[in-house]
Every structure is written in C-alpha cells, then in structure tokens.
Image (spheres, rainbow, N blue to C red):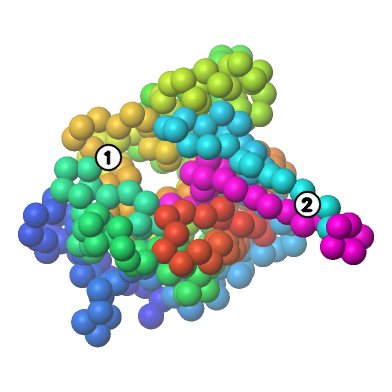
Amino acid sequence: MSNFSFPEFDDLPVVKGQPKGCLWGIFDVDGQKDQLGTLRLLTKEVVQKAKDEIRTGTHVQLDWPLHNIEFPGFGRIPLQHTVKDLAEEGFVAFDDVISFNTQTSSQWDSLKHFGSQKTAVYYNGWTHDQLKTSNDLGIHKICDRGGIVGRGILVDWLSWWEHKNPGIEPPSAISCHKIPVSELEATLAYQGTETRQGDILIVRSGFVRWHNNAKADIRALGTEKQHYMIGLENNDETVRWLYSKHFSAVAGDTMGFEAWPYPEDCCLHEWLLVQWGTPIGELWDLEALAEECKAHNRWSFFLASAPLRVVGGCASPPNAIAIL
C-alpha cells in the first residue's frame, strides 16, 4: 500500500482519556499494539519512489559532532571520550571509550523518550511504570524495521527569513521564538517544495549556526544556564497542520523542534511522540545540507538513517545521510 487513508482531524475516533486527534490503535496489526507509529507510512512503495530524489549523487551527513552541545542543560553530561592505547596488549592500535547522553547532540527521540506530563502515559497507552522495566517503544524498534529511509524535505526557514528581511538579525536561536505555520508554508512556497504523505520533515531554524559561531561563554549561557529555544509554534494550528501533512518523522536543528518552553495547553512533543508515534529529530546539523539545496535549487532528497541498536534505548544519534 503506497498511501494510508486518514480521517480528517476532527473525525478521528475518540480514544478514552486522550485528546481529540489521537492515533492510538490506527497502526495496530493483528491485535498487536503498534510500536512504530507514523514510521509505518514509509511503505516499500513510498521508499521506492523516494529513490527518484537521487539525481546528482551529492551526499551530506546530518550528524553534529558528538561533543556538541558543549554545555548541555537539564543536568545532562557532555561527551566523555577516551582513546585507549593498545600497546600494553601488544598491538600498534587504539580503541575508543565513549560515554554520552543521547539528548546532548544530534538525535532521534524514540517513542520511549517523552510521555504525557499530566497522565504519565506514552504512545499507544504504555505507562511510565511499565516502561521502567520494559524495552517496549525503544529505539531498537526503529532498527528492527530497517532504520528510517524515505524522502526528506528541508524547510529552510532561516534562509527564507533572511531573504525576506535583508540586513536584519534573525530571531535569536536561544529565545522562545515561535515559527508559525504561515511561515512554514511561505518557506515551502519560496522553495517550490511540495509535501507528500510519509515525508520526513526537517526544519532549519538557525540554532546550530548560532552555536557554531558563538563564543564559549555565550554558548554556556544559552544552553546550560537557561532553557529558551527557537522552534515551531506550539498551538492548535501547528498540530492540525502537522496532522494534515502525515509526515513519517520530523526533525530540526534546534534543541526541541518546538519552541521551548512550551505553553501548558500545547506541547508538540506530546502530540508527535505520544499521540501519533512520530519520532522527533533534534540538533541536526543542516548547514551543509542548506548550502547544497541552494546550489541544486531543490530542497527534497533521499534520506537514510540508521540509529544505534540499543535495546530499550530512549534516543540515538541519527547517523543520517541526505542524498540529492
């Protein structure tokens, strides 16, 4: 099947205890509770069609160096990397020992990462207590299905904004600047990019560029000592727009994809991860990709991503490559 048929947002069946718009049960197969969510939109037919995006062979990796973010917040530890000399073992060789929090650099959030903050439930009804002792919803479920492969689209909001506002400093990447649906649509129109069911949406807002250019004390102030981040506007219009597009996954170059902190009445993490089972990519390095897209005058590409196969993992570096 190349396309799923979805009801309109307001016509979705009611799921007890959940807000209107919940997709729990939609992707269940043979009575088994689904653990993949909207990744099921990446059917063989969708992936096969995505190969047509490969036209020049140009390819860009989208993972930021693991030592970024240099000064992580929320009590998370930065990368710890030790090189072990194997001379003592009789070899002319080296090994690596690496320890890091998967939220401190480029990542996919698995469906196990974030639950409903009020009800302590996760996608398809798993509870917080259940997931304490279960591998369900872990990142390995993505690996078991063969990773994430399909058509990616870059919504280069930052370039659009700078084109529309020449000579003006763009909104701060470390402010709670909310990018509205109207500007996402304007960016798509400016690029001439059309969306399809199953696309992997990637939004460039300028956070990685800010971090790359800022001095260390400013980076520390912006990422460790305060938690305000640019991102998609957290409101009903954005929720309905995302639903109407039926993306398989979403990603961006900012810390939370959505503007942070989120308002009490709308958290996109809860809609994407909890209600729909849509993986969220964060802190992706989109700088080289943005330049290649401009050079090719095309913002769609073939995307392949192979997360780390950590059973029960909450997140993973994306190991993502865009091929134009």
Q: Residue 13 appears at what percent x and percent y?
A: 11, 64
> Could you tell me the amino acid type at mark 1?
Cys
Residues at circles 2 and 1 in contact by the CB criterion of under 8 Å = no
Q: Residue at x 61, y 16 (%)?
A: 217
Q: Is residue 117 magenta?
A: no
Above or below 102: residue 48: below
Residue bearing mark 2:
84
Q: Which quarter of the picture shows residue 134? A: bottom left
- Which contiguous range is marked in magenta? 87-109
Residue 18 at x, y percent in the picture: 13, 54
164 horizontally vs 5: left or right = right
Please tell me which residue lies in front, 192 or 169: 169
User: Distance of mark 2 from mark 1, alpha carbons?
Assistant: 43 Å
Q: Is residue 252 above or below residue 249?
A: above
User: Is 195 on the left-hand or right-hand side of 137?
Assistant: right
Where disc 1 sits, the SS reads loop
